[in-house]
Image (cartoon, rainbow, N blue to C red):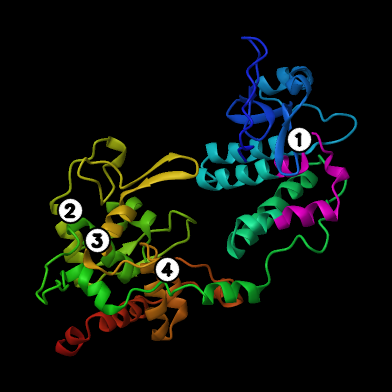
Amino acid sequence: MSGGSLKKPKKPYAEFPLTPHASGKWMKKIRGTIHYFGAWARRVNGKLVRAERDGWKEALEAYKAVADDLHAGRTPRVKKDGLTVADLANQFLTSKLRKVESGELSPNLFYDYRLITDLLVASFGSTRLVNDLAADDFSQLRATMAKRWGPVRLGNSVTRAKSVFKFGYESGLLERPVRFGPDFVKPDKAVLRRHRAARPAKLFERKDLLAMIEGKGATDDGGEKMVRADHTLCAMILLGVNCGFGNTDCSELTFTALDLKKGWIDFPRPKTGIARRCPLWSETVAAIRGSIAVRREPASPKDVNRVFLTARGTPLIVQKRPGYRNDLIKSRLHHLLKVLGILRAGMSFYAFRHTFETIAGDSKDQVAVNLIMGHTDPSMAAVYRERIDDARLRAVADHVRNWLWPDRATAE
């Protein structure tokens, strides 16, 4: 939180090692992780009130006590009086950062974890002992979360907050598990159902898809305007409705995973690594070939295996920093929907996955649908199932194609 009109203090002297943070804490980034030491202001009735002499001397002492260990990459010894919320947050983030560096955790998820630890520090105070936290503290924290976020994000945030304290116990930093109390729980399933029911369906109708793919639309005077997706966007739209591809799936798709001659894609989901196999329609194959024909040479050798690139030969999705990415697929689809006059709230590229799942489900072969979508199957049957016949996958894909182009199904 910004703290209203209260300005951050200046450093007491030029070489002072800490920097004032908007939350009212003194901080320093060490080896890629932000650490907090003392406070230059405290929150009173929702507003920041400056601490006496900006609290810089106390913050400096706290920093010096652990500086050698932190700069050397060691975990500082926990103070004898117990583990503080800031100590726990720092060690949790350090553990997650190592997983980011090893490729086991996405930068976006690390960013989400950091938002939660920042909230814990801001809500409980950096020097608050974890063992001192009680049920009423977590009840108030949940109330704060509920005011900021909807039920879906609230549930995810509760889970992530609990994982911070679970880490502390499993790492031996805490002698006993933290008791959160009865209120610090995810929203009830009925709340989630009502929330979803109140939102418009994330589904592209047949006429919308045909407008995007074939360029159908009407002008104000009743004439036709041939506005349609370009080669690359058209190919990605078809992958979305043919195979349930999302933005990242399209951006990360490789030639290695693509067999246009036989009309198949074997491509694990980048998000989860779950195996996925999808039969391609002839229309999808033709669109991909058209996109490849106008594909620019990659600007970097590391992108040579990507099927889709921008006009500059760069990836369509670029992770600028944790929590933010430049997604040209999203912006280009948004523009197309707006030009065609079919843009509505909540409709993003991911709606193609919703569309495929919805229509493919009517094929009555959910096992085959799950393999195409890259969904996990938690059932015991999945433990024993060794393969799914390609004919079942083809039948699911054909079912969606027949829904989109019923005239072509009749002609064939």
Residue 95 falls inside the magenta stretch: no
Residue identified by numbered label 2: 292
The main secondary structure of the magenta stretch is helix
- Image quadrant holding the N terminus, namely top right
Mark toward the start of the polypeptide (4 vs 2): 2
The x, y position of residue 206, in whole percent, is: 27, 79
**Which portion, as a residue range, is magenta?**
120-143
Determine whether the residue tagged by mark 3 lies in a helix, strand or loop: helix
Crowding near the residue tagged with mark 1, few <14, some 14–19, many ≥20 C-alpha atoms within 10 Å: many
Where disc 4 sits, the SS reads helix
The kind of residue tagged 2 is Ile
Toward which corner of the image does residue 352 lie, by quadrant? bottom left
Mark 3 lies on residue: 336
Residue 132 lies left or right of residue 292; in this view the side is right
Asked if the residue under mark 4 is in contact with the one under mark 3, i.e. CB atoms within 8 Å, the reply is no
Residue underneath mark 1: 126
Q: Position of residue 182 (x, y in %)?
A: 82, 64
Label 1 to label 2, Cα distance in Å? 54 Å
Residue underneath mark 4: 373
Give the quadrant of residue 154.
bottom right
Q: Nearer the viewer, mark 3 or mark 4?
A: 3
Q: Amino acid at mark 4?
A: Met
Question: Is disc 3 in contact with disc 1, using a CB cutoff of under 8 Å?
Answer: no
Amino acid tagged 3: Leu
Q: Is residue 332 left or right of residue 57?
A: left
Q: Where residue 98 appears, x then y in whole percent?
A: 59, 36
Residue at the spot x=38%, y=79% of the render? Answer: 360
